[in-house]
Structures are given as structure tokens and as C-alpha cells.
Amino acid sequence: MNIFIDVETLPSLLPDARELARQGVRPPGTLKKPESIAAWWETEGPAAIEEAYRRQALDAATGELGALGFCNDDTEPVSLVRASNESEAHFLRYALGEVLALVNTGNRTGPDGHVWPDEPFFIAHNAPFDLGFLLRRCWVHGLRPPFRLPGPSAREGKDYGDTMTAWAGYRGTIGLDRLCRALGIPSPKAGGVDGSQVFDLWTAGNHEAIRAYNVADVEAVRACWWRLNWMEVVA
């Protein structure tokens, strides 16, 4: 069964996360005088620290899962957004369980009553990031996924599908917004929200905006995959 997914990620919510980000920030090497360095920390340091902190969302070693959107070829996309007071481990367990429930709709029962479970074939845009983030965060929490998630050595086309690679090739890249515009498919970015805003929306409790953006991403991935594989695209 094809399962189209998209993740939305957050920087670490641990109490010392910003301090760890600060430790990796350095003033420009061109600044030599102590007073110049001190002035940089005062005027530009806070923004540099905040930027370094937010970049944690792009690294599964430090970032956390904030939302998971998914669907198959026939269902309407849904998005599960992590509650503000919910642990990541609890959210992961719940979200992957919901994906499993969708996968299980494809199970087949033989004449002897034996159930033949369906296997998910995950498809995403820049799939190594989305699938790798999910798997690595499961490793962090010691959670065994209820189905196989492709690992770092998985092969595109055999173990998972990737709309970015399908268009750009193994060494190429293209953003989902640009790919949608090239194919004449509604872009999930058209609503004015992009991934850089997810943390602010989540912090503000605007989970509905995240959900809408996450659903739009999943819809776009599915539409692009159908087009790139000569399948019917439903408007």
C-alpha cells in the first residue's frame, strides 16, 4: 500500500536546548578586538543563537516531531499535531499507530482465515529526511515502529518513493513548492505558511494552521507522485 507522508519538526524542547545552541555559535573570525567581539554578542549574538536553536529542527539528533500527515491513494489526508503538553514519545506511539490502522485496511484474509498483512510503501518529498527523522526519533525513545521504516541504507525506488528524486535524480534537488509549480499542481506554500513558521505556530498554540499546512503538503506529494508515475491526478 502506498502511504504518502509529511513530517513537521520542532527544535528540541529540552530545558538546556538553547544553551547547547549557544555553545555552537561563534563571532565572525574577522573580529579580533575584545570590544568588537563583545559588541557583536550584544547586537547580533541573540539572533545568531536563536537561528542555531531553530536549526535543531532539521537534525533528528536534536529536533523533535511536531506533526505527521499521511494518506494512501484513496483516503483524504489527515494530520496529527502534537499537543503542547504531550511528550514526543507518546505522540510518536500514537501517530505511528494511526498510520498502522490505515495500512491494516489493506490486509487480506484467505479462505482459511489467515490474515495476510499489507506492507506500507512510504512516499514523501525528500523522503530520506522525513522517514529518517521518524526512524531516528524512534531510536531516541527506544520505540519499535509497528511496521518497517526504511533506514539510512534503504534504496529509493525499492524501499521507499521520493518525489524529489523522481524529478531531479539521485544527486539533484528541487523544493516541493517549485515542483508543484512546474507540474501545475497547487502548492502547499501558496497559503503563506512554510516549514520555517511551524515552531512559532506550535508555540502559539495555532495547531489548526499547522494541520492545514501539513495536509496540503501530503496532498501535494500525492499529486506529484501520481503525475510523475503517469497516474491520474484528481483535482
Image (cartoon, rainbow, N blue to C red):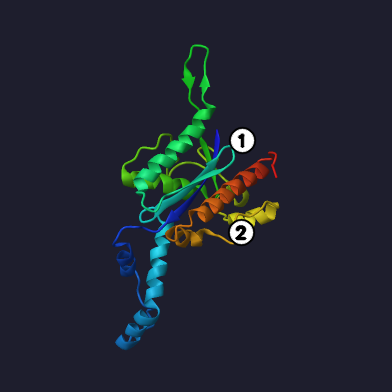
Percent position of residue 169, x then y:
59, 50
Quarter of the image containing the N terminus? top right
Element under label 2?
A: loop
Give me the disc on residue 74: 1
On the question of residue 119 being in view, the answer is no
Q: Amino acid at mark 2?
A: Gly
Q: Nearer the viewer, residue 160 or 84?
A: 84
Q: Nearer the viewer, residue 107 or 207?
A: 207
Q: Amino acid at mark 1?
A: Asp
Q: Is the residue 113 above or below the residue 103 in the image?
A: above
On the question of residue 59 being in view, the answer is yes
Q: Nearer the viewer, residue 194 or 170?
A: 194
Q: Residue at horizontal 68%, vertical 39%?
A: 231
Percent position of residue 233, x then y:
69, 42
Residue at the far top in the pictured view: 112
Based on the displayed image, in which of its 4 quarters is residue 55 positioned?
bottom left
Q: Could you tell which of marks 2 and 1 lies nearer the N-terminus?
A: 1
Cα distance between the residues tagged 2 and 1: 24 Å
Based on the displayed image, in which of its 4 quarters is residue 10 positioned?
bottom left
Element under label 1?
A: loop
Give me the disc on residue 191: 2
Percent position of residue 13, x then y:
35, 57
